[in-house]
Image (tube, rainbow, N blue to C red):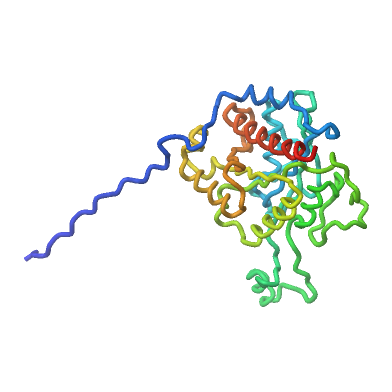
Amino acid sequence: MGGGQSKPQEVPQPKPNPELDKPWRKFDWGQKDALKEKLENFSPSHPDVKDIKILVAGQVGAGKSSFINSIDSAFQGRISSRALVNSSGGNSCSFTQNLKGYTIRSGTKPLPFVIKDIMGLEPDQLVKSAGVQPDYIFNALSGHVRDGYKVINQGVQTDDIIKAVFGHVKDGYKFNEEQALTDQDQDYTSDPSLSDEAFCLVYVIDANTVEYTDYRLIGKLKSIRQAISAKGIPQVIVMTKVDQLCPLVNNDLRKIYTSKKIKEKMELCSQKIGLPLSNIFPVKNYHEEIDTEDDVDVLILKAFDQIVQIADDRLVDIL
């Protein structure tokens, strides 16, 4: 009786180490003051340009406006909220509706940087090749959709972002989700000067959603990239919410460049959008803090310094 053989006990496998042996990107965590001073003393390389204009674009909820506020906070030494943001529990529509430029200041001193916030990007709700979204089909079958209902795009038009980069869109323009700005509109600048242009486009991408980003949104980003690259406008990616993605980084922000998960997301970002890793910067935005922190500031300031230098290189090239 009981002659059956007992099953061998399974030996629990150790969990893979989430951390690399050493940082894959060198980073000086003590350079905050030096970066701040460098940017405070910066002046554009082109004599006809007094401000470096940077356009910030990205998917709804990725943290565009929070990134602008975090830059401002790093210079002010306090939490800033000049660019209004929606809570994470808010609706999925873009909270930013108008093109608005924010001059960065250190204390009361204006610096030669204007960051332009734009309405968030969303994939089209209706694309001929993809057909109507399942929710619309369900609602229509259930009798919830009236005859004549027009399915529209969500978020800013791709053409509007391209026009904004090239200086054709006036500050304060309210974006129309159904139609891009035309040269007949009063908010269209037909002959922008060099100083009206943005010299760098920053894509803000949520680290938590990189692999889930809709292919149609990726298509929009690529079409923007193609159009502005042809004119020599550089681009960078700011990858936000890294603390929410990786527990290691949430516990210690200085683990950001030893985190395997962060590196994998950055590599995936590079593959999807087509930008090199050297143009991708992981950051933590301020979103719940009431005081600034040196480690958050230095990551923000380093990313911003790189953005400024890349933008200024564009000015050097057209001298």
Q: Position of residue 179 (x, y in %)?
A: 82, 61
Q: Where is residue 162 in the image (x, y as percent from the top left)?
A: 78, 52
Q: Where is residue 138 in the image (x, y as percent from the top left)?
A: 64, 73
Looking at the rendering, which quadrant does residue 84 occupy?
top right
Q: Give the residue at the far left of this rendering.
A: 1
Quarter that holds the N terminus: bottom left
Q: Residue at x 70, y 69 (%)?
A: 127
Q: Position of residue 234 (x, y in %)?
A: 70, 45
> From the viewer's perspective, is 50 left or right of 306?
right
Rendered position, 114 above or below 170: above
Rendered position, 249 above or below 223: above
> From the viewer's perspective, is 177 left or right of 133?
right
> From the viewer's perspective, is 194 left or right of 11?
right
Q: Residue at x 59, y 55 (%)?
A: 272
Looking at the rendering, which quadrant does residue 201 occupy?
top right
Quarter that holds the C terminus: top right
How many numbered callouts?
A: 0
Q: Which residue is drawn at 71% across and 48% down?
A: 57
- Between 274 and 131, the one lying in front of the other is 274
Looking at the rendering, which quadrant does residue 280 occupy?
top right
